[in-house]
């Protein structure tokens, strides 16, 4: 089992560009989430989903969209990238007792 | 705002010493979890303690929970250089909240 996979690993965008960060899991977990990690800020929850067709906002949702059409996939869309969105993005899947994290996507917005 | 807050922010010890880090949280919980993050990697689940438990052990890890003070501690005994990492606490619910983490450096 691959667990949680994220693509791409690295990405550089220009201000105003849009892109989608991919996240997939093969563990059949209902709960999936996206976090961003910035120096000194810990992990902040962007959006989460408790099952296919259900998404909700976390702590820092502005500028990001998500959808959950299948149990396996939970893509994160940046609509119009801004330098403030430069960060490392982690996707996770799991239960209320344990989350499994992907390896992360390092995004730089110029 | 973040639910969990760890302290100290950074901790440096010699190999073989014990490392203690603390976590405080704001609202009532069903369980609290500790995670580890090696540099540049995703977080890895270490241990979970439920709200009705006061102490839990797993190998060299010992976790305590004081729900009256809304705090938890993680003790790593007989530390090794490989324990060098950042450690985070997280509280449960539909929205997991992580603290800012404690950066542990174990000097060989």
Image: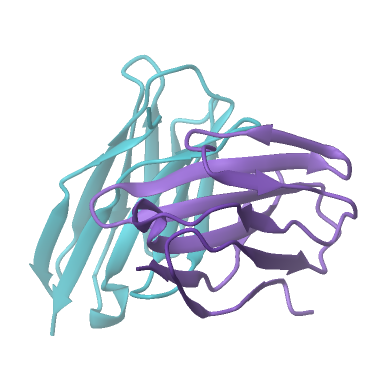
Chain colours: A purple, B cyan
Q: In the image, residue A106 lies at what x, y percent? A: 44, 72
Look at the picture and state if A85 lies above or below B93.
Answer: below
Left or right: residue B40 compared with residue B6: right
Q: In the image, residue A108 lies at what x, y percent? A: 39, 70
User: Residue at 56% across / 34% down in the picture?
Assistant: A58
User: Residue at 60% across / 68% down in the picture?
Assistant: A102
User: Residue at 13% across / 85% down in the picture?
Assistant: B108
Quadrant hosting residue B50: top right
Q: In the image, residue A87 lies at what x, y percent? A: 39, 61
Q: Quadrant of the C terminus of chain A?
A: bottom left
Left or right: residue A4 compared with residue B82: right
How many marks on residues? 0
Left or right: residue A9 compared with residue B63: right
Q: Quadrant of the N terminus of chain A?
A: bottom right
Q: Nearer the viewer, residue B42 or B90?
A: B42
Q: Nearer the viewer, residue A39 or B58?
A: A39
């Amino acid at each position: 089992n691959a667990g949680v996979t994220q693509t791409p690993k690295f990405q550089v965008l220009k201000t105003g560009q849009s892109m989608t960060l991919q996240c997939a899991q093969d563990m059949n977990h209902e709960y999936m989430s996206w976090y961003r990690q910035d120096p000194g800020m810990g992990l902040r929850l962007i959006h989460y989903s408790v099952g296919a067709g259900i998404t909700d906002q976390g702590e820092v949702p502005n500028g990001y969209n998500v959808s959950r059409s299948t149990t396996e996939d939970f893509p994160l869309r940046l609509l119009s990238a801004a330098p403030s969105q430069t960060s490392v993005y982690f996707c996770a899947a799991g239960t209320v007792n344990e989350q499994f994290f992907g390896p992360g996507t390092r995004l730089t917005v110029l | 705002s973040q639910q969990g807050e760890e302290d100290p922010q950074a901790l440096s010890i010699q190999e073989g010493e014990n490392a203690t880090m603390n976590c405080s949280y704001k609202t009532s919980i069903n369980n609290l979890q500790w995670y580890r993050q090696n540099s540049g990697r995703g977080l890895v689940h270490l241990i979970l303690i439920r709200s009705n438990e006061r102490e839990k052990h797993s190998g060299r890890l010992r976790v305590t929970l004081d729900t009256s003070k809304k705090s938890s501690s993680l003790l790593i005994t007989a530390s090794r250089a490989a324990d060098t990492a950042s450690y985070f606490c997280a509280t449960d619910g539909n929205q997991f909240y992580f603290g800012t983490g404690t950066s542990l450096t174990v000097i060989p």
